[in-house]
Amino acid sequence: MTNGDEQRYHGWANYQTWNVVLWIDNDESLYNLRMESDSYETFVQSLRDASGDKPIGYETPDGVPWKDSALDLERINEWWAAKE
């Protein structure tokens, strides 16, 4: 689906951004960590610290890195600030 020249994925900028948000919103542990974290960057660091060498500390279960260069961090930060 396209919106002008900009590629969209379920309302998000791209697959990577959508996948990260999807996992955070739909996995209880990740959601709870989001609620405890004041920013996405803090969330990523806390997840990495808590997971040790387990893959979840570096990427979603679908293999998208939490620090993927394609992430729309501006939009993620807006979404983060709007949390309840």
Image (cartoon, rainbow, N blue to C red):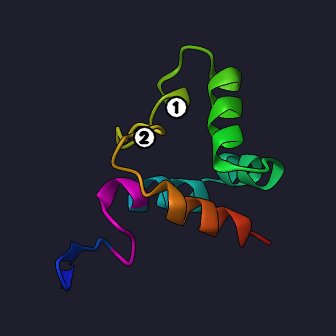
Residue drawn at (39%, 71%) of the image: 12
> Under tag 2, what secondary structure?
loop
Q: Quadrant of the C terminus?
A: bottom right
- Percent x, y for residue 56? 52, 31
Relative to 14, is 51 on the left or the right?
right
Q: Amino acid at mark 2?
A: Pro
Q: Which residues are magenta?
A: 10-17
Relative to 53, is 5 on the left or the right?
left
Query: Mark 1 sits on what residue?
Result: 56
Occupied quadrant, residue 31: bottom right
Tell which circle, 1 or 2, labels the residue nearer the N-terminal end: 1
Query: Mark 2 sits on what residue?
Result: 61
Residue drawn at (40%, 51%) of the image: 71
Q: CA distance from mark 1 to mark 2?
A: 7 Å
Give the dominant element type of the magenta stretch: helix, strand or loop: loop
> Under tag 1, what secondary structure?
helix
On whether residue 69 falls in the magenta region, the answer is no
CB contact under 8 Å: marks 1 and 2: yes
Residue drawn at (23%, 74%) of the image: 6
Q: Residues within 10 Å of mark 2 (few under 14, many from 20)?
A: few
